[in-house]
Amino acid sequence: MLKVSLIGATGYAGEELLKILLLHNEVEITYIAAKVDGPKAISEIFQALKGRLDLVCDNFDPDKASSSADLFFLALPHRVSMSMAPALIKAGKKVIDLSADYRLKDPGVYKKFYGVEHTDSPNLKSSVYGLPELYRKVIKGAQLIANPGCYPTSVILGLSPLLKAGCIEDHGIIVDSKSGVSGAGRCPSPSLHFPEVNESFKAYKIGVHQHAPEMEQELSAASGRDAKIIFVPHLLPINRGILSTMYVRLKKAMSTKDILGVLKGSYGNEPFVRVLDEGVYPEIKYVANTNYCDIGAAAVDGGEAAVIVSSIDNLVKGASGQAVQNMNIMNGFDEKEGLC
């Protein structure tokens, strides 16, 4: 059994990750930590775990952690993981970071969007972006995985095959995404209280969202040129799920069947990407609580443009499920183990 540890166990992603790992036949959870007032059984924090996992959750102890596990999940706030990962990597541990600390390869871009200097340049250079459908081969041999963001997962999966095939223009891409409230994390904020979110719908962080450069980095890699997007995220009054609608110009006229053919050609053997048939489009309810990404498409404007729609669960394929998928690949397990 692979011994695994979770640092940052009390957030939404941490809770989801624990539930998934408990269904996994190849791992044993041996150490959990979070910022807490004192030692407490994790089942006292999450009653759903009572009788399933009663490990004590306490503040992070580097020495105790390092000797307890072989692989570490860091479900920590942005800016925190880069202070913890170096010691674990130096000790020979595998690390899967669910924060943004190792996603952006340009430290200057990281500082611009996260407000601090990156303090771990050596590991930033060697980290692998953990989107299995694009980077499975390098994920297999990686020690440090930068688990993708939730919005980027939905958008990159929807657009990468079309950019790689040279079907769409790489500038002027419009991305309109909607997310459930859990995407903002468990830390309380006045704008996220139930009376503020319920019966409402809003756009936020227009032109300045921290996930935009992550998308552009990976879409540029797919295109071979600098890809540019206009990204507008929205907050839905639901708990979980993301729906992204992407508007693109085609380089030459294509039918809906042609576009879906490119997507199906890329994802036909992927265990967690479902390309839907013509006239069928993703819905959040069909991916909620799963590790699936559903993708649909339609040619518009006489075949001169296209609309691509994708949907994921932000806490599963957009965070914890994808982290487990990466762990499975890194350790030679069945990629679907523990996931649904």
Image: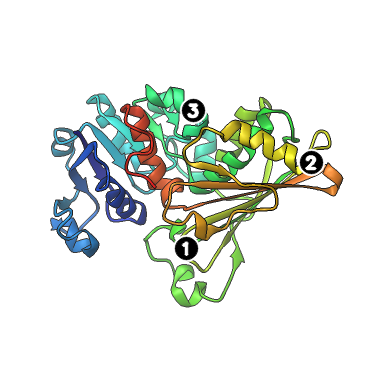
Camera-nearest label, 2 or 3: 2
CA gap, disc 3 and disc 1: 29 Å
The CA distance from mark 1 to mark 2 is 36 Å
**Residue 257, image x and y in percent?**
73, 40
Q: Nearer the viewer, residue 196 or 109?
A: 196
- Residue at image mark 3: 135
**Which residue corresponds to the image point at 68% horizontal and 32% vertical from the top-left?**
163
* Front residue of 280 and 160: 280
Secondary element at tag 3: helix
- Closer to the eye: label 1 or 2: 2
Query: Mark 1 vs mark 2: which is more N-terminal?
Result: 1
Q: Quadrant of residue 89?
A: top left
Q: How many marks?
A: 3
Q: Amino acid at mark 1?
A: Val
Dividing the picture into quadrants, the one containing residue 258 is top right
The answer to whether residue 227 of the structure is visible from this angle is: no
Q: Amino acid at mark 3?
A: Tyr
Q: Secondary structure at mark 2?
A: loop
Separation (CA) of disc 2 from disc 3? 29 Å
What label does residue 181 carry, if any?
1
Residue visible at 45% across and 27% down?
Answer: 136
